[in-house]
Structure formats: C-alpha cells, structure tokens
Image: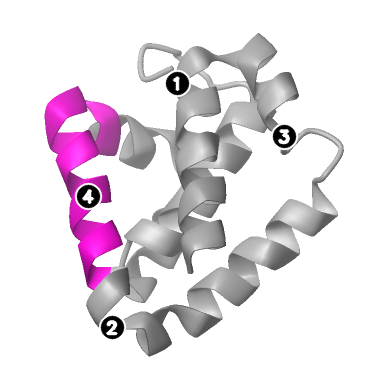
C-alpha cells in the first residue's frame, strides 16, 4: 500500500481511522494526506512498533482515547459499505491488516 502513487480511496479511509487512534490530534489535518501516510508506513517494523506503543498507552490511559474511539466509530459507521475485512482484503493486504488492527484495538477498548 505504501508503494501506491495514489491510494485507493478505501485504503486511504483505513489510514484515516488508524490515524485517529494512533496519531496526536494536532496532526489531524494530515490524516488524509497520502504522503503523510506513506511516511508513517515507510519502515514496516517501525510502523508495527508504533502500533504496539499505542496499544500499551491505551491500557494505561484509557480515558484519553474516548474521543478518538468515538470518531473512529462514526467513520466506520458512515463507511460501513467498505470498511470491513472482506472488502479490504480485495483492496490491499496492508489495508486489511491495518483495519484488522483498528477493529481489534476498538474491541479491546
């Protein structure tokens, strides 16, 4: 997915919901910026580590994520026609894996 010159809109939606969970609110204007998302995914191991850090932070600072998860839920509901694992599997394996993370962490929360 990071190699896409221009992402599929559905894959970009996955990046956006992931960013609502994993990124600081002051970066919100960049959530839909493809270059920003490519930078985040540039180094796969570093990207995966950042997801683990967020998971640990959610465990200790759960209340700090209430607004983030509310926004994620709104986006998932509004785009439920394609924000599912079956659809994302056909779009991109990376988008599928990131959406799987979003669902898992949302269910954990």
Instruction: Give the Cα separation between the discs numbered 3 and 4.
Output: 22 Å
Could you tell which of marks 1 and 2 lies nearer the N-terminus?
Answer: 2
The magenta segment is: 40-57
Residue 3 higher or lower than 43, as above or below: above
Q: Quadrant of residue 11?
A: top right
Residue 14 higher or lower than 74, as above or below: above
Could you tell which of marks 2 and 4 lies nearer the N-terminus?
Answer: 4
Quadrant location of the N terminus in the rendered image: top left
Could you tell which of marks 1 and 3 lies nearer the N-terminus?
Answer: 3
Badge 4 density bin: few <14, some 14–19, many ≥20, Cα 10 Å: few
Q: Residue furthest front?
A: 108
Instruction: Give the Cα separation between the discs numbered 1 and 2.
Output: 27 Å
Residue wearing tag 2:
61
The x, y position of residue 44, in whole percent, is 20, 25
Asked if the residue under mark 2 is in contact with the one under mark 1, i.e. CB atoms within 8 Å, the reply is no
Instruction: Give the Cα separation between the discs numbered 4 and 1.
Output: 16 Å
Task: Give the residue drawn at x 45%, y 13%.
Answer: 4
Asked if the residue under mark 1 is in contact with the one under mark 4, i.e. CB atoms within 8 Å, the reply is no
On whether residue 5 falls in the magenta region, the answer is no
Residue wearing tag 1:
94
Could you tell which of marks 2 and 3 lies nearer the N-terminus?
Answer: 2
Circle 3: element type: loop
Residue wearing tag 3:
84
Task: Give the residue drawn at x 34%, y 74%.
Answer: 26
Q: Would residue 29 be visible to someone looking at this image?
A: no
Task: Give the residue drawn at x 26%, y 60%.
Answer: 54
Circle 2: element type: loop
Relative to 62, is 54 on the left or the right? left
Which numbered disc, 4 or 1, marks the residue closer to the eye? 4
Asked if the residue under mark 3 is in contact with the one under mark 1, i.e. CB atoms within 8 Å, the reply is no
The numbered mark at residue 52 is 4
């Amino acid at each position: 997915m990071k190699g896409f010159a221009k992402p599929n809109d559905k894959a970009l939606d996955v990046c956006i919901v992931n960013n609502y969970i994993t990124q600081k609110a002051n970066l919100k204007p960049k959530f839909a910026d493809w270059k920003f998302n490519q930078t985040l995914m540039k180094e796969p191991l570093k990207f995966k580590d950042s997801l683990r850090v967020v998971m640990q932070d959610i465990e200790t600072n759960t209340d700090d994520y209430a607004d983030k998860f509310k926004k994620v839920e709104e986006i998932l509901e509004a785009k439920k026609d394609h924000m599912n694992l079956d659809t994302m599997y056909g779009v991109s394996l990376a988008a599928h894996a990131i959406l799987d993370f979003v669902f898992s962490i949302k269910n954990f929360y």
